[in-house]
Amino acid sequence: MRLMIRQAKCYRSGEWILTDVRVDDGIITSVGDRLPTGDEDEIVEANGKTLLPGLIDVHVHLREPGFEEKETIASGSRAAARGGFTTIAAMPNTEPVTDTADLVREQYRKAGKEAVVNVHFYGAITEGLRGEELTDFQALKEAGAFALTDDGVGIQSAGQMLAAMERAKEVGLTVVAHCEDNSLADRGVMHDGEKASRLGLPGIPAEAEAAHIVRDALLAERTGVHYHVCHVSSAASVQAIREAKQRGVHMTAEVTPHHLVLTEDDIPGDNALYKMNPPLRSARDRSALMAGLLDGTIDFIATDHAPHETAAKRRGFRGAPFGVIGLETAFPLLYTRLVLTGFLTLEQLVKRMSTAPAACFGLPGGVICEGAQADLTLVDLEREETVDPAAFYSKSENTPFCGWRLTGWPVWTMVGGQVVYDEAQGGITG
Ligand SMILES: NC(=O)N[C@@H](CC(=O)O)C(=O)O
Ligand SMILES: [Zn+2]
């Protein structure tokens, strides 16, 4: 299969310039001005739309097996394609939990049949995410586990985290941490701040997150493992990561689109569409996250796409599960709120949504150059649209951004040289 993408705006030697990109059998073979045409099977006329390396999201919940009413590998991967993502990594808090080599293999087998983008799977750190027995890291690694995590819960015991890091270092897997000390956060449903006091709801203090980061940075320093912090939400956490990185600790960190855009002040009363873990925090915390993203303390953006059915999210802050979806809104949300406002340049945003996650986890993609895998996204930066959850490919609609007017929508997605999403052809293709 030979394909030419013609006249796309591409970032080359410091500029966005009209470029042709040639793809042969899933690999980018040429990038340049007015490349010769003639022998391709297909020409894609980009007409000045912007070509990005496919977006990469290492923090999504696909809910299969066990919670297929919320999401499946098929529906979640289609949501990813529509959002411009070509690679995602799925968390192991399914039912059963992905905590054995056989279960990891079964996930890859299913994704091979049903996914339209590249899907990786995490393995759990502890059996059943119970925080008791460590899983068999070597076997998980051999089955292809992307990294290790108990996302959804923090590893409560420092001794257990140390043991996990030592073993992970030996087998060569990254430890990915949901940082939350339950003895500080127990039964909280919202950031322990002004809004929670006003609504009379139990809080989750910022220290519940930062305490684990400080602890884990010490343990990562001692073991030398690659340690990655999920969904950083507070100023104290950003500072802890900054200090650890200055000491040379081998750690990386991610932040979500919702923590970059919203604060507790945006929560309109007891509406669980604004309930997620970690919670939306103060304006000061949000500023610190932005500063951390800008100075490299936070390496990249991950959505923490966490689908839940509408009925469950109607139960208010006390009764609803934590989590919001993000795959189909992340790019236009951040383009509108961070790039059009002048906070980040487009190329800085692309680095944080594609190049950096690829580099941190050693994934192919994240670049447009000769020899790279043809994972590509075309974005219409002029296109303005209202977020309509009813139109999502995701099975769930739990977004706080319903009705937001956003600019800069992905319109075409290619994975390994195959077009998987083309808005002009009605959406998911094939
Ligand atoms: N982020 C969330 O609010 N929820 C996640 C779990 C998690 O990532 O902590 C979920 O699985 O629903
Ligand atoms: Zn989490």
Image (cartoon, rainbow, N blue to C red):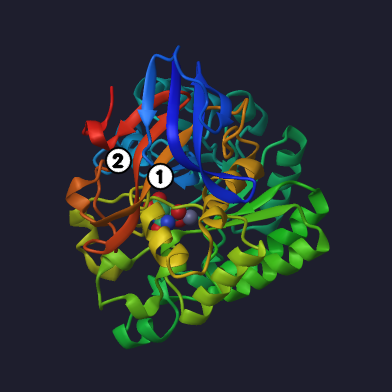
Three-letter amino acid code of the residue under disc 2: Glu
* Mark closest to the chain's N terminus, 2 or 1: 1
* Residue positioned 75% across, 64% down in the render: 244
Label 2: few (<14), some or many (≥20) within 10 Å? many
Image spot of residue 47 (x, y percent): 36, 39
The residue carrying mark 2 is 71
Above or below residue 345? Residue 124 is: above
The answer to whether residue 259 of the structure is visible from this angle is no
Q: Is residue 27 left or right of residue 403?
A: right
Location of the N terminus by quadrant is top left
Which of the pair 327/384 is nearer the observer? 384
Q: Which mark is residue 61?
A: 1
Image spot of residue 212 (x, y percent): 63, 64
Q: CA distance from mark 2 to mark 1?
A: 8 Å
Three-letter amino acid code of the residue under disc 1: His
* Residue positioned 45% across, 79% down in the render: 192
Q: Quadrant of ligand 1?
A: bottom left
Image spot of residue 164 (x, y percent): 68, 45
- Asked whether mark 1 and ligand 1 are closer than 8 Å, the reply comes as yes
Image spot of residue 127 (x, y percent): 54, 40
